[in-house]
Image (cartoon, helix red, strand yellow):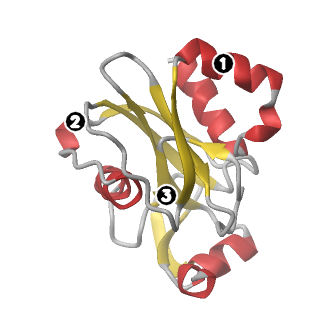
Amino acid sequence: MQDSISQELLSVVDESDKVIGMEKRGIIHAKGLLHRAVHILVFNPKGEIYLQKRSMRKDSSPGKWDSSSSGHVDAGEEYLQSAVRELDEELGISVSPYDLKSITKLLPTAATGMEFTMIYETTTDQMPCPNPTEISAGRWLLRDQLQSWIEESPTDFASCFLEVWKAFQNQ
C-alpha cells in the first residue's frame, strides 16, 4: 500500500501557490517540495467536531489524532474538489461543494509538511463511516473538550492539525 501511495501524482507549486509541475508524492515529501492539501472539520448539528485517529499504516503522523478528513490535492485537482473527494473517501460523507465553508489557507511550513493547506468546515447529520485503511478510530468532541485535550496532550495530535485548529479558533 505504501508504495502505491508514494506513486500518487501531486502538483508541485511555487511560493505563490502557482502550479509549476507534477511529481510523485514520495519524491515531493523526500525533497520537501511545496504542494497542496486540504483539511475538513466536520461538525454535527449538536456542534461536536469529529476527529479521526490516523491509521498506523500512514506515512506521516501514524496513530495521531487529526482533522475530520484531510489529504493531498491531486495533480489537476482544485482545493474544493479535493475536499469533497476526501470526505467521501475517508468518511463516506457525501457533500456538494456548496456544503463546504472555506475558512482560511495556511502557508507551507515544517508543521504542515510544506503544504499550502486549505481549511474547510461543514455541518452534517451524516454519520462518518471511517475507511479502515486510512483511519483507526474516530470520536465526536465538543470544542471545549478538544481544546482541553490539546492543552493537556499536544503530542496526541498531528502537527498540521494543531496548526489547523489554531487557525480555525482564530477565524
**Label 1 – label 2 distance at C-alpha:** 25 Å
Residue at 36% across / 33% down in the picture? 102
Q: Position of residue 58 (x, y in %)?
A: 64, 66
Cα–Cα span, label 2 and label 3: 18 Å
User: Which residue is depicted at the point 64% across and 74% down?
Assistant: 28
| Residue 78: numbered disc | none
Q: Which residue is mark 1?
A: 147
> Left or right: 24 with respect to 109?
left
Q: x%, y% of residue 73?
A: 43, 62
Which residue position is annotated with label 2? 99
CA separation, marks 1 and 3? 23 Å
Identify the residue under disc 3.
Answer: 71
- What's the amino acid at mark 1? Gln
SS class of the residue under badge 3?
A: strand
The local secondary structure at tag 1 comes to helix
Whether residue 89 is situated above or below residue 96 in the rendered picture: below
Q: Earlier in the sequence, mark 1 or mark 3?
A: 3
Crowd tier of the residue under label 3, counting other residues whose Cα lies within 10 Å: few below 14, some 14–19, many 20 or above: some
Of callouts 1 and 2, the N-terminal one? 2
Residue farthest to the top, as pictured: 144
Give coordinates of residue 142: x percent, y percent.
52, 17
